[in-house]
Image (cartoon, helix red, strand yellow):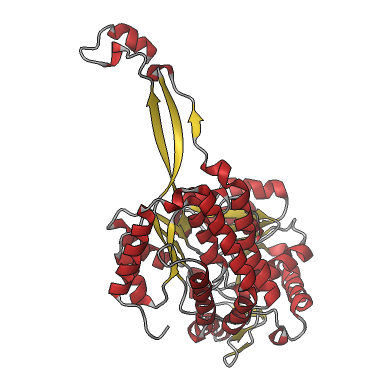
Amino acid sequence: MENQPSTQSIAKATAAQRKFFATGTTLDLRWRKKQLHLLLQALEKWEQPLYDAIWKDLHKSCEEAFMTETSIVKGEIHAHLRHLGQWARKRKICTPLKLFPSQSYIVKEPLGCSLIIAPWNYPIQLLLNPLVGAISSGCTAILKPSPYVPEVSQVIADMIADTFPPEYVTVIQGHREVNEALLAERFDLIFFTGSPSLGRTVMEAASRNLTPVILELGGKSPCIIDKEADIALAARRIAWGKTLNSGQTCIAPDYILIHSDVKAAFIKAFGKAVQEMHGSDIQKDRHYVRMVNDRAFERVCGYIEAARNGQDGGIIVYGGHHDAAERFIEPTLIDSPSLFSPVMTEEIFGPVFPIITFDEADGSFKDKVTDFVNAREKPLAFYWFGRKKDGWDVIRRTSSGGACINDVIMHIANENVPFGGVGNSGMGHYHKRESFEAFSHSRSVIVTGTWIDLPFRYMPYKMFSLVKKIL
């Protein structure tokens, strides 16, 4: 990690992949399936080193790493192995009479050489899951892991080097300068997961070569709690979603919009749920993840200290403890902060939870929370707790990448539904078939018979009145 690759070596790596793709090796479906099997075997072989590395980087337990990282990638591989033949099959499409005697087809072809840039919060899943789509579709891939999780990044680099030739799949590590050098190269697809601000940088760089992009970004995902909600259940599921990876999840509930009638009950139930999951001393729980680095720790602690010092109008009603030596931050609820404060304008990406209260004095709760959400950027996730029919109504009137009714996070766990953002929270989808499609081009092919050649399309357009009726 100290000796970053040079611009020349990056250009050489991309040129090698482009040359390898041009050989046509990746077009063969049996070959692609073999590569998927190799990746699956590599995950089995390197599973424990990956768990050891993610513990060092994030204090993430092997149980959580399995559930949120390796098991998801393995499930994705199995899905592609089962369905790749069907997805890649040439499809015959209905042809209108005006094209007689032609037949129409859609052919799937790989886009080519891809660049996959992953963040640090789920460093295994968010790097290797897109790779499954690249392999399945027949693309080559340069993988760029995050430098903020050096242990995991190095293990993945070793695993990939042990499994694939670099002209097919390779890992390039480094900091901002390496990102800039990679983005200066020409790719056929850039798959980026990260913040909206960095997503703009990626999209700007891609525009120079008209390179398509998949942007999986983030934002402030609302969690709405109506007075009809099962408060104990809501508190447990929300506490799990907010403490998972210590809140460092792109689809973590970011802030709470709650009915005034149930706020006090929720705060009490939230505290109880945290203790049931993590014990009376959460700092000693091996399942509670730490902040990734000092910068992230200080940024999230800033929200707590602003509330403690009365700088943003909020009041700490639960938690607030933190320890710089371990980069530990206790789950914290901040009641009624200013809507213009950083905790309400920035993506928190940590275990701090602002609470905004609504009542029905001047309108319905649903109308108020809908207006609140719609006045802000479209979030990556949207969570509703209350009656299902009310949840569906609010979902219909808002927009987000994904959504859950009476749950959080779990929409990402179903590989049968697409995952992706909308607007400021991203563009494009992946998971299962969507991953295959993301790295593929749908090519239209028209095959016209030679046994007859109708004269109607040729100048000087004889029998034009008949042609008008047909068309």
**Residue 301: which quarter of the image?**
bottom right
**Horizontally, is 170 left or right of 386 in the view?**
left
Q: Which residue appears at 35% of the width and 74% of the height?
A: 178
Q: Quadrant of residue 288?
A: bottom right
Residue 189 seen by the camera: no
Residue found 37% across the figure and 10% down from its top: 469
Q: Nearer the viewer, residue 374 or 458?
A: 458
Callout count: 0
The answer to whether residue 323 is above or below residue 90 is below
Foreground residue, 309 or 374? 374
Q: Nearer the viewer, residue 234 or 12?
A: 12
Above/below status of 174 relative to 447: below
Tell whether 220 sits left or right of 268: left
Tell me: residue 362, above or below residue 232.
Answer: above
- Percent position of residue 231, x then y: 76, 63
In this rendered view, identify the residue nearer to me: 105 or 362.
105
The structure residue drawn at horizontal position 73% and vertical position 67%, both measured from the top left corner, is 235
- Quarter of the image that includes the C terminus: top left
Give percent across and percent down for residue 428.
Answer: 47, 52
Q: Residue 310: where, in percent of width, then height?
A: 54, 83
Q: Does the image show residue 426?
A: yes
Q: Quadrant where the N terminus lies?
A: bottom left
How far across and down, in percent of the image, does residue 321 sit?
Answer: 64, 87
